[in-house]
Image (cartoon, rainbow, N blue to C red):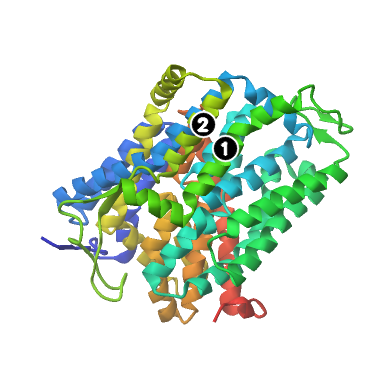
Amino acid sequence: MPWSQVYNPAGHWLLSAAVAALPIIVLLSSLAFLKFKAHRAALLGLATALLIAVGIFKMPPSKGLAVAFYGAAFGLFPIGWIILNVIFLYNLVCEKGHFRILQESLTGITRDRRLQLLLIAFCFGAFFEGAAGFGTPVAVTAAILIGLGFTPLAASGLSLIANTSPVAFGALGTPIIALAGVTGLDILKLSAMVGRQLPFFSVIVPFWLVWAFAGFKAMVEVWPALLVAGSLFALPQYLISNLHGPWLVDIIASLISMLGLILFLRVWRPNRILGFTGIEERREDSSTPAHSRKQVVKAWLPWAVLSVTVFLWGIPQVKARLDAVSSFKILVPGVNGLILRVPPVVPAPEAEPAVYTFNWLSFTGTAILVAAVISALIMGFSVREMAASWWKTLSRVRYSLLTVAAMLSLGYITRYSGLDAAMGLAFARTGYLYPFFGTLLGWLGVALTGSDTSSNVLFGSLQKITAGQVGVSPVLMCSANSSGGVMGKMIDAQSIVVASTATKWYGHEGDILRYVFFHSLALAALVGLLVFLQAYVFPFTRMVVK
């Protein structure tokens, strides 16, 4: 029997929004302040969401439980599958001692930790965001940084801060493609508009990243490299998004930025370097580590194999072929087509689909597993050794997998019960200030769901409707949902768990959340300010795509 969502069960929009926010408040406060283990905080937040959805928003209990299992399944596959296999690859590399060689080989480019952070977290991470998304860049870059000698908190938090400005064009443009699908707006217009917002932050984020790591003075010392990396990412991001579309933005921009930075560091060095001992030295030692070229190639080979494999898996034609032989769909009983979103969230009552697609062969995590197996064979592991290492990895990340499953359950209940819409409608009442607060709605959506794509699906239609009521461009506000959303990526519980798992710092998710929360909110507010200027203030209004 169909059930229509209710958005104001408390009788006042503000009170209903406050009640709807309780599961997120419980989750984040238990992580950040009560210092619960992540899986316990996630389960507590999930229980709160179920109680509020059923008891106050009147969601039928059977539908609530079905949605909870649906979200948990998505949390394990594909998200948990990515985490498991990235850590598996990392463990294999560590067992052979290649991480030490990788670390020392990087000193051939620079011994400065600030610049290594820029190269790995920003440039390399953006490539993985463009190729795969869904937590892959944080898992890979955090694992590499921890192997390079960064502290667990720094490796986790800085990987999250770096994984922001590329997110809207991640996974070959998936968030923009989804946004166009739910709003009916032209995909090229949306791509162009996002491409007139995020390049500003692609220049800012490298500076912000190093400032967060080493302080303002240390950031100023390497500003030329930060400007080179940011500008060489921002310019292609703008040009490709406006002249071609959303599909290849991150892939091309990250490669140009990475190559440009490496070439720049061959001719420029900071006056002082920040070494692995934490002592600032007066000059850069240009001597290279005592490793043969063959050893260095073997140390980097697993990551090269990973890059190529993930990129190939992300090509639409390859993905379609893999899906054709491995994909099957499960219609979630009692939910698929039986939960209705209603006005003012959508123009007319609209049935929510609930179809779990288990395309196991085309999962990004499967690509990572293939890369790990290939790399293991190259490194000389036997099949038995590989199996033992994989099982050991599974045991190590079991609580992380439980946490991600519970987090996604919470997010799905929030969506299907209408809790998200109740909060979104509160933002929509801000009138003239809506361009600013509508941007923060995208930030909230990603913080809730862990995905810019999911946030666009959740709030894209609401953004379009409200923009028309307020009198601003629907293209501007729908794009702002995605651009603002990228700054919520660093505080979503799913990403934090990925980071803590990659750095083997499980149980410290609250520390990571406290580390990144200010950065997330401040950057989201800056995006909101830019969108506000684009809505009302000349000459920024000329940037809006017609």
Q: Is residue 12 left or right of residue 480?
A: left
Q: Which labelled disc corresponds to residue 305?
A: 1
Residue occupying the point 84% across, 43% down: 266
Amino acid type, residue under disc 2 in the picture: Ile
Q: Secondary structure at mark 2?
A: helix
Depth check, front residue: 215 or 442: 442
Depth check, front residue: 166 or 417: 166
Q: Is residue 315 left or right of residue 62?
A: right
Q: Earlier in the sequence, mark 2 or mark 1?
A: 1
Q: Is residue 533 left or right of residue 49?
A: right
Q: Secondary structure at mark 1?
A: helix
In the picture as drawn, the residue positioned furthest to the left comes out as 1
Q: Are marks 2 and 1 in contact (CB under 8 Å)?
A: yes
Residue occupying the point 79% across, 21% down: 290
> In which quadrant of the rendered image does the N terminus lie?
bottom left
Residue 348 x/y as whole percent: 26, 75
Q: Which labelled disc corresponds to residue 374?
A: 2
Residue 457 x/y as whole percent: 38, 62
Q: Is residue 384 above or below residue 170?
A: above
